[in-house]
Amino acid sequence: MAWDMAEAIAYYKKQGAPGDQNALVALLREIRQEQGLTARALGALAPALGVKESYLMAVVRRYPSLRPAQEPVLELCAGPNCGKSTALAALAERLAAQSGVTVRKVSCMRLCGKGPNLKWKGRLYHRADPALVEKLLKGEKE
Ligand code: FES
């Protein structure tokens, strides 16, 4: 049986949501898990619970477990030196699109002599090439 938001709302209302914050948070966690706590989901939930959307957003901000999961971001240096590697950027964007990773071009990382530079999961990589990008995005290298 497919998950149904209306059923979940009805269930957690019986548990005391939105007045009972534990029930409300449990409902929000379930929605997050099933479809994501998007602005659209919160917009549909607020009138169903008789609360303002801004209230729900405040609850989401208050509970770290309700915040959206961090999507991996591949940061490519687009400074004057590293930015010359257009083939690397094109490959990174193509692979990222396939794997759901966000590619962000950032300004000079101030390590121009070691470029092209990129940052993945908080770690800086120097002399990046297409093979490195492929390994990182395929999870073969951390
Ligand atoms: S251009 Fe990439 S570190 Fe400066």
Image (tube, helix red, strand yellow):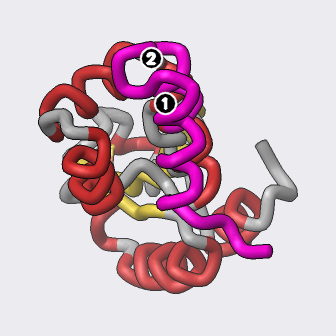
Callout 2 crowding tier (Cα within 10 Å): few <14, some 14–19, many ≥20? few
Residue 102 point in image, percent of width and height: 44, 62
- Main structural element of the magenta stretch: helix, strand or loop? helix
State the count of labels. 2
66 in the magenta segment: no
**Quarter of the picture holding the C terminus:** top right
Residue 78 at least partly seen = no
In reply to whether residue 10 is colored magenta, the answer given is yes
Q: Quadrant of residue 87?
A: bottom left
Q: Which residue is mark 2?
A: 63
Q: State left or right for residue 48 relative to residue 1.
A: left
Which region is colored magenta?
1-27
For the residues labelled 1 and 2, say whether their Cβ atoms are less than 8 Å apart: yes
Give coordinates of residue 137: x percent, y percent.
68, 64
State the image quarter where residue 78 is shown. bottom left
Q: Which residue is mark 1?
A: 66
Task: Residue at 19% x, 34% y: name it.
Answer: 51
Is 39 or 6 nearer to us in this picture?
6
Name the kind of residue labelled 1 in the image.
Leu
